[in-house]
Image (cartoon, rainbow, N blue to C red):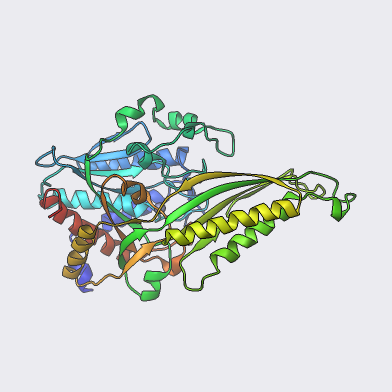
Amino acid sequence: MAINQSLTINSPRLHKRIEDLSKIGRLGETGVCRLALSPEDLQGVQLVKSWMEEAGLTTRIDAFGNLIGRLEGLDDQLPLLMIGSHIDSQPYGGRFDGVIGVLGALEVVQTLTEQGIVPQMAVEIVAFCDEEGSRFNKGLFGVRGLTGRLEEGELERMDGNGVTRRQALIDFGGDPGQFAASQYAEGQVGTFLELHIEQGPILDSLETPVGIVTGISGPLWLTVEMTGFAGHAGSVPMSMRRDALVGSAKVILALHDLASSEPGAPTVGTVGSLTVFPNSRNIIPEKVTFTVDLRDIDMDRRDRRELQLLALLDRAAQEYGLTYTLREDTNSEARFCADWIKKVMEEQAGEMGLSPPKLMSGPFHDSLTMSYFCDYGMIFVRCKDGISHNPLEYSSPQDISIGTELLYRTAVHIASQGAGRD
Ligand SMILES: [Zn+2]
């Protein structure tokens, strides 16, 4: 294929690494489970670190648990070019989510060096710690640490086994006492680039290998706890019950209906986690905790849906005699990619004989946080049927190579231009 012949990157090396990393925390035939700050996560980080060193980068794991590999540039006073993503996974995850962004970035820098190109500015490759947020119910930890956006109480968050993030981070090799020293100064990073699988079906439906991301829609994450009163399932009459699960079910359905209420709109709403107490077949549920994930590109519409949901929550609580608490875990607005980076990507793709479509990202990524810190750009790689956060997640080696090549050419262009901006 014409595109393949013009690849500068070393495809076999890239795919061998993706395959090797997928063996750590392997789940069944094709899945992975590398929860943030777990022994498997550390093993993965150590492996990637060894590859970074093989590629001639200076490496370190910072206080937040981020793995950083650095290639010096001609002028280290210039804002640096940072490229990366994450290698932690969901408990029931795939092999490519995050991974292609880290190993693709590594391939970019290794190729750069092999081509004898010395970048104007230093280039750093990052595998950010805990992007997924699955274990401690709040993600983007490493990237928020690096950019000074952590919030009160984050280290006291506990996983399902009662382990605090503080303890997990220390066990991993991070250091809560050294956060300030690992934080980057405003202006230190000029550009951030991320390669990621789309995690949605648009590129697959367009039968095209890569796309240029225009922005990331804002997620709202809530945790709702509804409390009623436990009783014997065999004796308490229906009219006297205060069943927390029935009230919760009403809210969960309401979220689904609200997110579907405008045909064609990209609004999505999900309750993905539910805990029932005491969780016994013959006891009326007393307490139910569930998460809400609500996203949209249009902030006004998302805010309207949130208000509607909260009104329905209040009504459901009254109807079933429940009390409730509401916690906002994450509230991000839509963040748009820099126009000049999209232009560079478009030009470079054109030279590769591609005309990638532009698309928004529904899922958030490390780029979301970086967008508050510097200009950012993202490349999406087609993933089969849009399946992700699932062992069935699949992107073809060919598509990943094309995405990595586009990342390489974009990086070369930026690295040879200094700041990259006109
Ligand atoms: Zn990801």
Write down the quadrant of residue 69 in the picture: top left
**Residue 76 in sight:** yes
Task: Give the x, y percent position of residue 16.
Answer: 32, 54
Task: Give the x, y percent position of residue 335.
Answer: 35, 55
The structure residue drawn at horizontal position 18% and vertical position 64%, both measured from the top left corner, is 348
Q: In this view, does 312 lie to the left or right of 96?
A: right
Task: Give the x, y percent position of residue 49.
Answer: 30, 40
Residue occupying the far right of the picture: 235
**Residue 388 in sight:** no
Task: Give the x, y percent position of residue 372.
Answer: 32, 46
Location of the C terminus (image quadrant): bottom left
Q: Nearer the viewer, residue 264 or 304?
A: 304
Location of the N terminus (image quadrant): bottom left
Write down the quadrant of residue 306 in the picture: bottom right
**How many badges with numbers are in the image?**
0
The structure residue drawn at horizontal position 39% and vertical position 41%, both measured from the top left corner, is 129
Vertical order, 54 against 313 (above or below)? above
The structure residue drawn at horizontal position 55% and vertical position 32%, both measured from the top left corner, is 163
